[in-house]
Amino acid sequence: MQRRFTLTGLLAALILLAFLQAACRKQEMPVDNMAVVNKALFDTASNFYVEFDEYPDEMRNLPIGVFDSGTGGLTVLEKLLSLDRFDNITGREGRDSILDFAGEHFVYLADQANMPYGNYNAEGNNEYLKELVVKDALFLMDDDYFSNPIEETPTGLKPRAKIIVVACNTATAYGLDLIKSMVEQTGTGVKVIGVINAGVSATLDELQLKGDEKPFAIGVLATPGTIASGAYERTLREELASRGITTQIDIINQPGYGFAEAVDSDPDYVNPLLFAPRSSYRGPVLGEAEGSISQELLGAYNFDFSDNKVLARRSPGGGYASLQLNSAENYARFNMVSLLERHRQSGSGTQIRAIILGCTHYPFYLETLNETLAELREYREDGRYPYRDLIADEITFIDPAVYTAIECYNTLRADGNLAYRITPTKVEAYISVPSNLLVDTCLTGEGLLTYDYKYGRKTGTEEQTTKQVPFSLDNIDENNLKRIEERLPYSYALIAPSLK
């Protein structure tokens, strides 16, 4: 009888201990977490709560999660899908004609409804940007999705990610550390990779710097938000110091005004159906302010005016009273010339040897960027060549995507989490769309979030203003889909069959 009492008491004590431990965990909720992180970790009643304790212990067969603010991150997915840099048996560098991620599954999220991310900084709402980035990671770590925009609760089921690739420079700049902190608290063992560190390491590796280098310059072309964060320059300086490189290196930070938005066919920046300037335009305009189109540099820009790729209004004096860019190619030209002009105005005189494409959207127009650079080398004004001496004989364009893919491979291999499947590679692609529960005043005529509503939202609420749904012909712009088909064949081949 005494024995039964002892066992019963012991069992009760163990239950009490477990209860007290759970209570302590609640009390020890990190006070420096963002509200959405605490909701995801501790608040079982929240829309954003994730049951991390249900994460599989064996993760190698889970998918690789990739997210970006739009479809530009598919350039990173493309490098993951097409990478053949390693011997798949030994793991050593060296191509073996077998794709390094053969048989892997991927989940891709384009947070299209909330882009462009760079504008949150411009509107003084970095906190909401950080919350969005954390929510992107939570989507990849959760196991459900909205099957369509009118569902009130998600009914679709998907696998959780074994690694998160932040394929967005702005998201990396503002949210990488937040995601890493949250993921560490989940205890799942999921790793997180961002594109900025990979791009910086790649730049310095490609330049093969020695101790006796002459001063030179590195250009950084990124979104205004990424540039404003200082992430690329800070990381470049830190990496140079860690490598013991003391050469004078000028870093030219050029905000890519409207470039990413134009690539993603944002109607506030490009609209091929228009024939004249319009009031809703948010891209660069003629003027003298930062980010404006300079009347004096029109010859250097060499814009393509055909097929309404520039919307112009002439002034009575014969010049232009209004200019609005209306093609991604012209945005590429504008920002490349702006980078060179910024360096020229600095008076440094150093030659640019490398340009980092600090946005996943920009590699789509690498050909245009190269073409513009070649034109600037030969551009003549008042009998002189203003840019020729600033351009090295060979300039390296750095696309961080391939180096991010390499880091992803090395991380998964080191952790024993490569799938090594013999079945086909698979991609599940999702995109955010405005919630059908929003009132009409929050939406444009095209059904998108209005600018003021998008960038004026508050953090910490339970409101789900956007929903993640599968890619479909209804939510992917026709021009974007054509561009993906032409330039990202691996991604298109795996995504297109599921489009309806």
Image (cartoon, grey):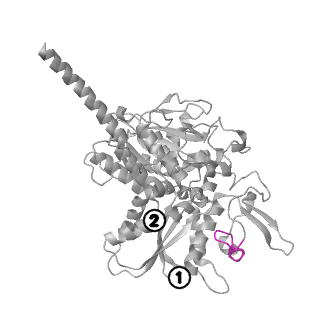
Give the amino acid at mark 2. Tyr
Residue 420, can we see it?
no
**First of labels 2, 1 by sequence position:** 2
| Kind of residue indicated by mark 1 | Asp
Residue pictured at 31% horizontal, 69% vertical: 242
Instruction: Residue under label 2, please give it.
Output: 232
Depth check: give the residue in front, 99 or 264: 264
Instruction: Identify the residue under disc 1.
Output: 389
Q: Which of the image's four quarters has the C terminus?
A: top right
Q: Secondary structure at mark 2?
A: helix
Magenta region, main secondary structure = loop
Residue at image x 72%, y 52%?
Answer: 272
Q: Which residues are magenta?
A: 287-297
How many other residues sit within 10 Å of disc 1, few (<14), some (14-19) or many (≥20)?
Answer: some
Give left or right: position of 28 versus 439. left
Residue at the limit of the structure toward the bottom, as seen here = 383
Q: Secondary structure at mark 1?
A: helix
